[in-house]
Amino acid sequence: MTGLTTLQGKAAPLDQANIDTDQIIPKQFLTGVTRSGYGIHLFHDWRYLDLHEQEPNPDFSLNKPKHAGAKVLITRENFGCGSSREHAPWALADFGFTCIIATSFADIFYGNCVNNQLLPIALPSEQMDKLFAAIEADPDVIFNVDLPNQSVQVGSISFSFEIAEHHKENMVKGLDAIGQTLEFDSEISSFEDKRRVWL
Amino acid sequence: MAQTLFDKVWNAHIVEQLGEDTLLYIDRHLIHEVTTPQAFAGLNEKGRKVRRPDLTFGTMDHSISTRSLALDACGPQNKLQLQTLADNCAEHKIALYPVGHKNQGIIHVIGPQLGLIHPGMTVVCGDSHTATHGAFGALAFGIGTSQVEHVLATQTLKQTKGKSMKVEVLGKLPLGVTAKDIILAIIGEIGHAGATGHVIEYCGQAIDDLSMEERMTICNMSIEAGAKAGLIAPDEKTIAYLENKDFAPSKEHWDNAVEYWKSLASDVDASFDTVVTLHAKDIQPQITWGTNPGQVVGVNQAVPSPDDFSDPIEKESAIKALKYMGLEAGQTWDQVKISHVFIGSCTNSRIEDLRAAAKVAITGKVKNNVTAIIVPGSVAVKEQAEKEALDVIFKEAGFEWRLPGCSMCLGMNDDVLQPGDRCASTSNRNFEGRQGRGSRTHLVSPEMAVAAAITGSFTDSRQFGE
Ligand code: SF4
């Protein structure tokens, strides 16, 4: 995977709390056997007026021309709650997002994002309010996200964010997590030698 | 230092401490068709092997038909996904219980039923309801597909330890109130993100009094409270449940295993990051009214008004949810008419659930214009129910008796609701569109679901049966 350091781009707002994985990518699109091609189905129920994805819902934020091409999604509390389906970050990334900024994330979803180079940033709700206001004032405003320095800068505002050191390192370097763990092969083997016999 | 049950299981699985992260050994890896194809593809691309096929078990449950055993019964895409699982398991020598096998069923139903889950284990699966297995005092949690690949390749996972939450339910549960009502009441109390970042330990008399199957119902919905895992300390019931199960420890190791399991309880002076206390006597049969599992009330309470919520986000969510659900504030539940009933899912499709449902079903008939289906959690549950002639009771009452699978819990097969359909469902999620675009889901216990089927609207199930 390629590393992620900084990104610049427009942001699209989804001003709603508790957006669950069934909304991000509904079940009927989970029958795939590859990791690609989910972007078209992202937010299916909200984004399309029909079942066949022919009629975009003009009122849905991501369909508005002013938000076209956004790389950052900004939203509210508990984003990604519900199922463990990794199809959710796959769909978001496939649609074109590289970063999600929200008030908070559900645990499993957060980990799934990190494992797919989709940067999840949690910020306090007052700061989120300011980001929403910035897009409202100018939909073309550019978000500058700097992962190594853990900062988000939009116009005159700048916020720092928290991310665990190991998540940051993996994302910045685009490391292969499995390859890293396989370096501990002998430690895993010696753990296995000591496991209880009935296991 | 005093330790919680969570600490004990965690500490027993540390392969290596890597800064804040722990490389944790995984004792049991459960797999199904939806979240694994990309993981196996990843392994194959890099020429990696499955490290411990002997600790990995698979079944088919999500995208299968409940009317036919044919893999293509729900279309070519579902078939491809199911066939891909079969091919991957064959190639990597993983035990698979496919459609038609006597051990097949919803992954979280068959794991315990086969004795695959022991106290003190670490258990993972590419499915958020893996928390079900915490009922055995195992640390069990759902993972994404990248992590499935990681576990296949290394039998370990890198994890940061979560916080601990104790949820105690004190006193005796009132008659006619179920495990489903306890967990819904807990989620109603703490909110559906209330336990984010935590592992829950459930305890107290009301929990001790529950059977293993009821405990699974509780732990199953830990994720609906935001927790990755929920567990309950093993006791005599846990040990009795496991005895003589196919994958329980063999006779020669049984006593040692039991001795170890008995050490798996939180120390009396162990401290938790968060403690929540409920009184069992306050819990009534529950119904969700909204589009997240925390939007729940007792059957004798009316549909709430957005003005009942002081928090602006909750208020906003309530407005949206009432609109989606087609409900009015102040409506009483007998005024809410249903079109469908679904009894099944990894929350409530075990034999005890079906027995409880049958006790209500025997008292009446499914109302005209209501479609009611019963989907047993596994082949073994189905066979046991048929042995007890529960299927006869259900069929005579007008329920459809289906083949085991996830079915209408998420509708990856053809068990899907239409826009505007209103369903009393024993499953675990009431998100918008969960059971079909525009459909409305109310989460309830099996008893409440049957009572709704009979009356055609929501009714206190305590009026039925004995
Ligand atoms: S029954 Fe529902 S919640 Fe359980 S594993 Fe199947 S789809 Fe998931």
Image (tube, coloured by chain):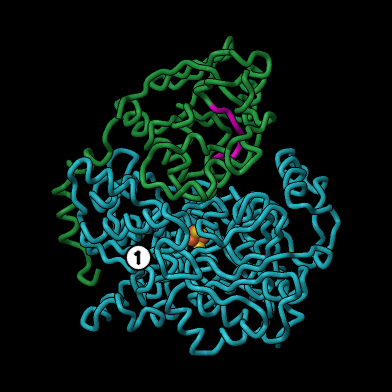
Q: Based on the displayed image, in which of its 4 quarters is residue B380 positioned?
A: bottom left
Residue that protrudes farthest toward the right in the picture: B330
Q: Amino acid at mark 1?
A: Gly
Q: Is residue B98 left or right of residue B187?
A: left
Task: Specify few, some or many for label 1: CA neighbours under 10 Å numbering under 14, 14-19, or 20 or more.
Answer: many
Chain of the residue under the numbered disc 1 shown in the image: B
Q: Is residue B93 above or below residue B100?
A: above
Q: For residue A77: magenta?
A: yes
Shade representing chain A? green
**Image quadrant for the N terminus of chain B?**
bottom left
Left or right: A195, with A119 as reference point: left
Please give left or right for residue B76 compared with residue B274 in the image: left
- Say which residue appears at 19% left-offset and 46% top-offset: B48
Quickly name the residue at label 1.
Answer: B120
Chain B drawn colour: cyan
Residue at 36%, 54% in the rendered image: B80
Q: Which of B375/B430 is in front?
A: B375
The image position of residue B223, as x and y in percent, is: 52, 54
Q: Using the rendered view, name the quadrant where residue A136 is placed.
A: top right
The stretch of residues the image draws in magenta is: A73-79
Residue B461 in which image quadrant? bottom right
Counting from the top left corner in percent of width and height, residue A161 is at 49, 26
| Residue B257: image location, x then y, percent | 28, 75
Which image quarter is the C terminus of chain B in? bottom right
**Residue at 52% in and 20% down:** A69
Q: Is residue B373 left or right of residue B36?
A: right
Evaluate whether residue A10 shows in this view: yes
Q: Is residue B303 magenta?
A: no
State the residue lying farthest toward the top.
Answer: A156
Task: Pick the residue in front: B222 or B394.
Answer: B394
State the residue at coordinates (42%, 80%).
B236
